[in-house]
Amino acid sequence: MDDLAAILEANRSFYRAFASGAFADLAALLAPEDAVTAHPWRPAVHGRAQVLEGWRAILEAGPPPIRCLAPQVSRFGDAAVVTCIEDTGGEPCIATNVFVRVDGAWRLAHHHGAPLAPGFLSGADAPPNVVH
């Protein structure tokens, strides 16, 4: 599998784990370094332990129906940024996921999601209704 395909698969794995509430899968995907930052719906936190604690609380409250639409990858050596539109069943969000290569595997180092302005994506501007 080439790097682009592997990065997109890591991104898909993140959204599958998030949407299904699979904490163990999400934890396995998270980078091992303490530089791991942020998670949704809360102020940014730093360090793997704090990020995992935040994800556990989010998933225990009930995972959202979330899908990643139209992901775009930018790669910078052993780091990659995936941007996408998150469909949560309400107003869409813009998301940025940063992955780092650790021992040959792409691991999530940072996630940030923020709501788009109401009505920003409508009609022809909306991404295709598919999950990548």
Image (cartoon, rainbow, N blue to C red):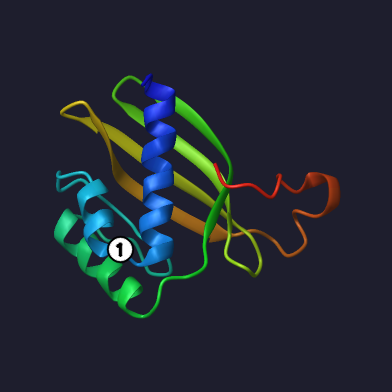
At 37% from the left and 47% from the top, the residue drawn is: 13
Viewer-side residue, 92 vs 69: 69
Whole-percent x and y of residue 16?
41, 54
Query: From this viewpoint, which residue is outermost toward the bottom?
Result: 61
Whole-percent x and y of residue 63?
41, 71
How many numbered circles are shown? 1
Q: Tell whether 57 sits left or right of 40.
A: left
Picture quarter with the N terminus: top left
Whole-percent x and y of residue 56?
26, 70
At 24% from the left and 31% from the top, the residue drawn is: 105
Q: Tell whether 102 sits left or right of 117.
A: left
SS of the residue under disc 1 = loop
Question: Dividing the picture into quarters, in which one does residue 60 lie?
Answer: bottom left
**10 Å crowding of disc 1: few (<14), some (14-19), many (20+):** some
Whole-percent x and y of residue 65?
52, 67
Question: Dividing the picture into quarters, in which one does residue 44 lie?
Answer: bottom left
Q: Is residue 91 above or below residue 32?
A: below
Q: Tell whether 56 sits left or right of 80.
A: left
Viewer-side residue, 36 vs 101: 101
In this figure, which residue is indicated by the disc labeled 1?
22
Q: What type is the residue that disc 1 sits on?
A: Ala
Picture quarter with the C terminus: top right
Q: Is residue 60 above or below residue 53?
A: below
At 51% from the left and 50% from the top, the residue drawn is: 95
Viewer-side residue, 43 vs 88: 88
At 28% from the left and 75% from the top, the residue drawn is: 57
